[in-house]
Image: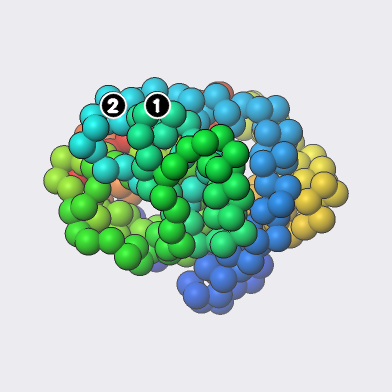
Amino acid sequence: MSARTSNAGTTPGGATSEREAARWVQEMFGQVAPRYDFLNHFLSLNIDTRWRAHTVRRIAHILSNPGARAMDLCCGTGDLLVAMERAAGRPLLGSDFCYPMLAGAARKLDRLGLHSSLFDADGLELPLAGESLDLITIAFGFRNFSNYRRGLVELRRVLKPGATLAILEFSQPPNPAFRAFYNFYSTHVLPRIGGLISGSSAAYSYLPASVRKFPGAPELRDWILEEGFREVEFDYLTFGIAALHLARK
Ligand SMILES: C[S@@+](CC[C@H](N)C(=O)[O-])C[C@H]1O[C@@H](n2cnc3c(N)ncnc32)[C@H](O)[C@@H]1O
């Protein structure tokens, strides 16, 4: 990881330590949890559903292996986990450190007749044995880690040799004109609508601020490589608003 980003993690709301940053993120998601699904689909014009579907297609070969142990980390209210369990045809694992988001995932799985197991865990300190998983997915969670390097080290620890890490995350659109348009929308339009509907303007100001601070896809690829993963590749999604990184341990 380059010197500029060596200790980087999210730093919301003036947090002065990693612990404060993590608690801020946890509480913020707790506040928006009841309206998270609606807002997600509404503000992204439902494009987020297509991004998760793309992710599932890219990992389908792992999900279709009945012996593969897969976990969706930062599963939130469970949208990616639902798509993964449906593709796999068997229960998987989902975890998150925000209880209200996990409770939403539990209700959703129940309503849809799905049976994945959920557990409360911090992605930087997973309660899992080393080399125990064949696949970890993270959708829009990694950006919120209070220390990206430690996060990658921890994910690598619990993956088996040869296992896959899939990170779906907001990114920096490579085209400057599109990036300017998107920055305007995410800085001026999204926080107003998101704040009004969710009642948490902090949450929807944090979102564009954290996206702006997060690296572009080539830089994230370099970070992942620097933490010992190989075969790291990425797909830009919707002009680079998001990117899916795939890596092997
Ligand atoms: C934007 S939501 C994404 C939820 C879901 N993956 C989706 O695609 O809709 C981010 C989630 O990451 C979780 N999260 C952030 N940092 C975390 C950490 N260190 N450990 C576990 N979960 C974390 C939050 O609680 C939140 O539920």
Residue at 38% in and 47% down: 93
Name the foreground residue: 214 vs 106.
Answer: 106
**Residue at left 24%, top 48%?**
133
Label 1 – label 2 distance at C-alpha: 7 Å
Label 1: how many residues lie within 10 Å, few (<14), some (14-19) or many (20+)? Answer: some
Q: Amino acid at mark 1?
A: Ala
Residue occupying the point 43% across, 58% down? 119
Q: Name which residue lies at 44% across and 42% down.
A: 115
What residue does disc 1 label?
Answer: 87
Can residue 66 be spotted in the picture?
Answer: yes
Circle 2 residue: 64
Between residues 181 and 29, which one lies in front from this camera angle?
29
Whichever of labels 1 and 2 marks the residue nearer the N terminus, that label is 2
Q: Left or right: where does residue 115 sit relative to residue 163? A: right
In which quadrant of the rendered view does residue 98 lie? bottom right
The image shows residue 226 at horizontal and vertical percentages of: 25, 50
How many residues crowd mark 2 within 10 Å: few (<14), some (14–19), many (20+)?
Answer: some
Q: Is residue 20 left or right of residue 166?
A: right
Q: Position of residue 50 (x, y in %)?
A: 55, 24
Relative to 78, is 100 on the left or the right?
Answer: right
Q: How is the image coloured?
A: rainbow
Q: Secondary structure at mark 2?
A: loop
Quarter containing the N terminus: bottom left
Image coordinates of residue 186 in percent, x first then y, are 70, 40
Residue 90 x/y as whole percent:
35, 34
